[in-house]
């Protein structure tokens, strides 16, 4: 056989040969889609690793500076609210501006003492109780998180009555729940199959036979590879090492029911060539297609899980459609927004500190901003 070492698994269509059969076309489509999903999974993994590294290196410090600037602004505005020269309407506008800013700031502050001080500011200017409101909001957030987890991962996660979890803890619980559901589904499937085996009808018997034949087809490939690559039969140390590495790949592919990987290994060691695959019977291809369809489904599930975990880790909108190639572009845009906001906050603080009378201009601008927001959302 003269197949190149990395010949792709595919049934070739040559001008002189007969058109590909339905099973041959399906085989090629499965192979193509599996390779696409593998490429997509690899692209996600590489893009997420790069995103995570740059996020930690650039976004986290900028966000820390942003939070620190907001804390300073809120504290300065709180101190300015004691000015007796301010009118009642000006105080009300100032308190609303403080409340709007501090409400989203408290949980982002790492220092407990600062957080307690911000809660006190919130309570004084809002006339409410931050902890009580947060507890109520958390219950709503949990319901939304449960719905999101159900949509993204197909997992029913009970968050009621639990303390607010970090994204890392939530991801860990989702993975544990998914593993438990997979195990339960596997047990149910095995129990269902055992029940069917006890008294199957004609259609079920046929499905069982096809599943058994598909499993047998994969096992036959494995045995051929193991017979050719078993390192214990090799006397040359270098060749034994090569075969040991190949055999590890064979065992892993067989354990995970990865038919495509096994076929690729057969081509790689020149145990078969493309003509061999093209010459497979329709019945054998039907068995192969069954296994390949399962492999494709598992890959698609893995891609969805990787994407969903990424969005949850970084608090992104889980329903937006992202592509790996666009992650760094989106991150650069976020960095630019943060940089502009930090510059604006720095100038705003410097202006308020330099001129105590500037608080009146700030209140005037805040009143205009609140009016624009009310006009945009008439329900509030």
Image: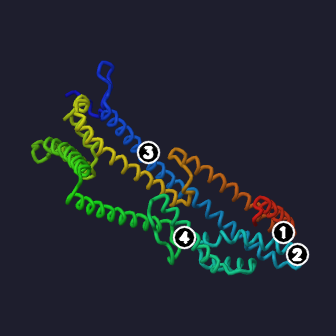
N-terminal-most mark, 1 or 3: 3
Q: Which mark is residue 359?
A: 1
- Can I make out residue 254 in this image? no
Say whether marks 4 and 2 touch (CB < 8 Å): no
Left or right: where 298 falls relative to 89: left
Whole-angstrom CA distance, mark 1 to mark 2, is 9 Å
In the rendered image, which quarter contains the N terminus? Answer: top left
Q: Which mark is residue 21?
A: none
Left or right: where 334 falls relative to 355: left
Quadrant of the image occupied by residue 127: bottom right
- Mark 1 against mark 3, which lies toward the viewer? 3
Secondary structure at numbered mark 4 = helix
Q: Position of residue 367 (x, y in %)?
A: 83, 65
Residue under numbered circle 4 = 142
- Mark 4 against mark 2, which lies toward the viewer? 4
Q: Which mark is residue 40?
A: 3
Residue under numbered circle 2 = 86
Secondary structure at numbered mark 1 = helix
N-terminal-most mark, 4 or 3: 3
In the rendered image, which quarter contains the C terminus? Answer: bottom right
Where 336 sits versus 84, above or below? above
Q: Position of residue 343 (x, y in %)?
A: 71, 57
N-terminal-most mark, 4 or 1: 4
Say whether marks 1 and 2 touch (CB < 8 Å): yes
Secondary structure at numbered mark 2 = loop
Whole-angstrom CA distance, mark 4 to mark 2, is 41 Å
Secondary structure at numbered mark 3 = helix
N-terminal-most mark, 2 or 3: 3
Q: Residue at x 57, y 74 (%)?
A: 139
């Amino acid at each position: 056989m003269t197949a190149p070492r990395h010949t792709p698994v595919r049934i070739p269509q040559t001008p002189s040969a007969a058109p590909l059969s339905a099973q041959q076309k399906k085989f090629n489509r499965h192979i193509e889609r599996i390779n696409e999903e593998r490429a997509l999974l690899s692209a996600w993994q590489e893009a997420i690793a790069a995103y995570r590294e740059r996020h930690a290196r650039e976004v986290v410090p900028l966000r820390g500076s942003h939070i620190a600037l907001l804390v300073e602004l809120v504290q300065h505005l709180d101190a300015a609210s004691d000015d007796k020269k301010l009118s009642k309407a000006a105080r009300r506008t100032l308190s609303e501006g403080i409340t709007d800013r501090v409400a989203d700031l408290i949980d982002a502050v790492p220092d407990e003492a600062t957080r307690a001080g911000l809660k006190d500011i919130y309570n004084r200017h809002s006339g409410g109780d931050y902890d009580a409101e947060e507890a109520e909001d958390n219950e709503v957030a949990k319901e939304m998180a449960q719905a999101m987890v159900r949509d993204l991962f197909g997992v029913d996660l009970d968050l009621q009555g639990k303390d607010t979890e970090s994204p890392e803890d939530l991801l860990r619980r989702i993975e544990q729940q998914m593993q438990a559901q997979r195990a339960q589904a596997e047990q149910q499937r095995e129990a269902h199959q055992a029940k069917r085996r006890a008294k199957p009808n004609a259609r079920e018997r046929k499905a069982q036979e096809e599943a058994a034949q598909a499993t047998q087809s994969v096992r036959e490939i494995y045995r051929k590879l193991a017979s050719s690559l078993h390192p214990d039969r090799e006397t040359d140390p270098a060749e034994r090492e090569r075969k040991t590495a190949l055999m590890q790949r064979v065992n892993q592919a067989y354990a995970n029911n990865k038919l495509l990987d096994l076929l690729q290994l057969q081509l790689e060691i020149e145990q078969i060539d493309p003509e061999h695959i093209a010459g497979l019977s329709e019945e054998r291809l039907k068995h192969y297609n069954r296994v390949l369809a399962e492999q494709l489904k598992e890959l698609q599930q893995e891609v969805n899980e990787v994407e969903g975990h990424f969005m949850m880790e970084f608090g992104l909108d889980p329903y937006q459609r992202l592509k790996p190639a666009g992650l760094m572009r989106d991150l650069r845009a976020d960095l630019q927004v943060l940089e502009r906001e930090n510059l604006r906050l720095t100038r705003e603080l410097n202006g308020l500190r330099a001129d105590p009378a500037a608080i009146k201009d700030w209140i005037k601008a805040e009143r205009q901003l609140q009016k624009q927001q009310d006009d945009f959302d008439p329900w509030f």
